[in-house]
């Protein structure tokens, strides 16, 4: 699958087969994440690869929109080191791009993945900070649930010509 096809056909996948996701695949997803652009190339990201079911279940119990975690074979928490940002807020932008790279790389590897929103919801951030024992300078941005897809979704149809402006509004 080339990059454009991955971009145009990716969907959130929330149902997974009972089949392991290899470390090799996880390494590729992390490599893709760390290939992302970042403000002033600060690369403020850290990734916590979660396979321990007790940790996944602890997050699932308290996250209101995370049923898919129970089927996911691996979850990647994308976090930012706030001491690395040159301007307030850039860690969020940088870690969001890294999260998107993971989603696209997963799709390109024929895995299914979905972004679980953590930042900026303080109660969810606290939950992830506690579950993963994050140090004070590390803030959680997202969780990505990953598995082999057990659902097929059509490519999105989101073309909105009225959202496109040329030369000025
Ligand atoms: C910042 C952000 C937070 C999200 N949080 C959740 C979530 O907590 N639970 C969930 O099931 N999906 C979550 N999603 C996935 C969106 O629901 C999904 O991307 C959207 O419905 C579009 O569908 P698609 O990804 O299949 O194109 C999140 C996506 C983003 C970008």
Image (tube, rainbow, N blue to C red):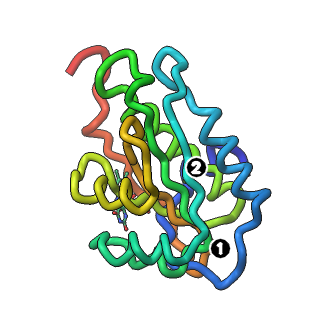
Vertical arrangement, residue 145 with respect to residue 139, above or below: below
Q: Which residue is depicted at the point 24% across and 16% down?
A: 168
Which numbered circle lies on residue 96?
A: none
Residue 44 location (% of width, % of height): 49, 30
Q: Residue furthest bottom?
A: 18
Q: Is mark 1 within 8 Å of ligand 1?
A: no
* Residue 26 screen position, x and y as percent: 69, 56
Q: Pointer 2: what residue?
A: 102
Q: List the residue tagged with mark 1.
A: 148
Q: Please tell me how crowded label 2 is: few (under 14), some (14-19), or many (20+) other residues with Cα within 10 Å.
A: many
| Rendering coords of residue 132 (x, y %) | 46, 57
- 94 relative to 31 in the view: left or right: left
43 in relation to 6, above or below: above
> Where, quadrant-wise, is the C terminus in this rendering?
top left
Question: Taking 143 as reference, is 19 left or right?
Answer: right
Q: Is residue 38 left or right of residue 107?
A: left
Q: Nearer the viewer, residue 12 or 30?
A: 30
Q: Secondary structure at mark 1?
A: loop
Cα separation, mark 1 vs mark 2, equals 14 Å
Q: Residue at x 50, y 46 (%)?
A: 99
Which quarter of the picture shows residue 110?
Answer: bottom right
Which residue is most to the right? 24
Label 1 with label 2: CB-CB less than 8 Å: no
Residue at (50, 45) in percent of width and height:
100
In the image, residue 136 lies at what x, y percent? Answer: 36, 40
């Amino acid at each position: 699958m080339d990059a454009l096809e991955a971009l145009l056909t990716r969907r959130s996948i929330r149902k997974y087969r009972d089949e392991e996701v290899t470390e090799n695949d996880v390494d590729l997803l992390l490599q893709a994440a760390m290939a992302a652009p970042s403000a002033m190339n600060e690369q403020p990201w850290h990734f916590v690869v979660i396979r321990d079911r007790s940790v996944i279940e602890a997050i699932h119990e308290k996250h209101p929109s995370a049923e898919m975690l129970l089927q996911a074979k691996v979850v990647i928490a994308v976090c930012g080191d706030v001491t690395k940002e040159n301007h307030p807020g850039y860690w969020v932008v940088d870690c969001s791009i890294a999260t998107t790279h993971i989603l696209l790389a997963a799709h390109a590897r024929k895995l299914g993945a979905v972004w679980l929103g953590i930042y900026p919801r303080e109660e969810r951030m606290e939950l992830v900070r506690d579950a993963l024992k994050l140090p004070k300078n590390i803030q959680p941005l997202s969780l990505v649930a990953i598995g082999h897809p057990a659902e097929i979704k059509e490519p999105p149809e989101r073309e909105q010509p009225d959202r496109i402006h040329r030369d000025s509004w």
